[in-house]
């Protein structure tokens, strides 16, 4: 009897841990992974690399362009694109509500994850993109302005 009970406990624990593990196969799962990676990035450089991998191609390209420019301005010092995600500067505007804190609105290869704040009506809408079967966070990173745009012709 005790053996059957322990077996059931193990099954419940394993199943519940599988159900709560975030994955990039869903928009909200990818967003949870991104938030976790950015928070980890404050003390673990690999966190920023993981967060970079969860960005869509457009955002990754913009960060790569910035890393190349930063390297040129630093007289040859090499920067990686994920180095452009500044360590320790990420902060959530609010704590997402537990359970129903994230809802997804999927339209083909694009989605919006609405994040509801814990204990208030505040929320955020995060655009997501499906790339090669994985959901990615779509950050709007503006293009780098050329020298002409900055100082004029």
Image: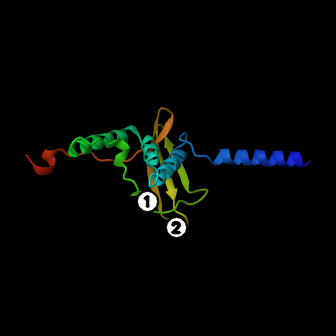
Name the residue located 52 percent from the left edge and 67 percent from the top edge.
120
Mark 1 and mark 2: span between their CA atoms? 18 Å
What is the residue that sits farthest to the bottom in this orientation?
119
What colouring does the structure picture have?
A: rainbow
What is the residue that sits farthest to the left in this orientation?
153
Mark in front: 1 vs 2: 1
The secondary element bearing badge 1 is classed as loop
Q: Position of residue 112 (x, y in %)?
A: 47, 48
Q: Position of residue 107 (x, y in %)?
A: 48, 41
Name the residue located 44 percent from the left edge and 62 percent from the top edge.
93
Q: Which mark is residue 136?
A: none
Q: Quadrant of residue 75?
A: top left
Q: Position of residue 33 (x, y in %)?
A: 52, 47
Disc 2 residue crowd, few under 14, some 14–19, many 20+, Cα 10 Å: few
Which is more toward the observer, 58 or 125? 58
Which is more toward the observer, 87 or 28? 87
Q: Is residue 84 left or right of residue 1?
A: left
Name the residue located 30 percent from the left edge and 43 percent from the top edge.
67
Task: Return the residue at label 2.
Answer: 120
Lower position in the chain sequence, tag 1 or tag 2: 1
Task: Return the residue at label 1.
Answer: 91
Name the residue located 83 percent from the left edge and 48 percent from the top edge.
6
Number of numbered discs overlaid on the protein picture: 2
Q: Is residue 91 left or right of residue 61?
A: right
Disc 1 residue crowd, few under 14, some 14–19, many 20+, Cα 10 Å: few
């Amino acid at each position: 009897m005790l053996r059957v009970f322990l077996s059931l406990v193990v099954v419940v624990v394993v199943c519940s841990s599988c159900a709560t593990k975030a994955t990039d196969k869903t928009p909200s799962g990818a967003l949870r992974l991104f938030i976790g990676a950015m928070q980890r990035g404050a003390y673990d450089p690999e966190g920023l690399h993981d967060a970079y991998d969860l960005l869509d191609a457009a955002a990754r390209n913009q960060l790569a362009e910035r890393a190349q420019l930063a390297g040129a301005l630093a007289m040859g010092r090499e920067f990686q694109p994920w180095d452009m995600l500044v360590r320790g500067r990420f902060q959530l505007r609010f704590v997402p509500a537990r359970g129903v804190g994230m809802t997804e609105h999927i339209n083909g290869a694009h989605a919006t994850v609405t994040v509801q704040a814990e204990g208030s009506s505040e929320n955020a809408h995060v655009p997501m993109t499906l790339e090669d079967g994985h959901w990615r966070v779509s950050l709007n990173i503006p293009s780098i302005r050329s020298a002409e745009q900055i100082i004029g012709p």
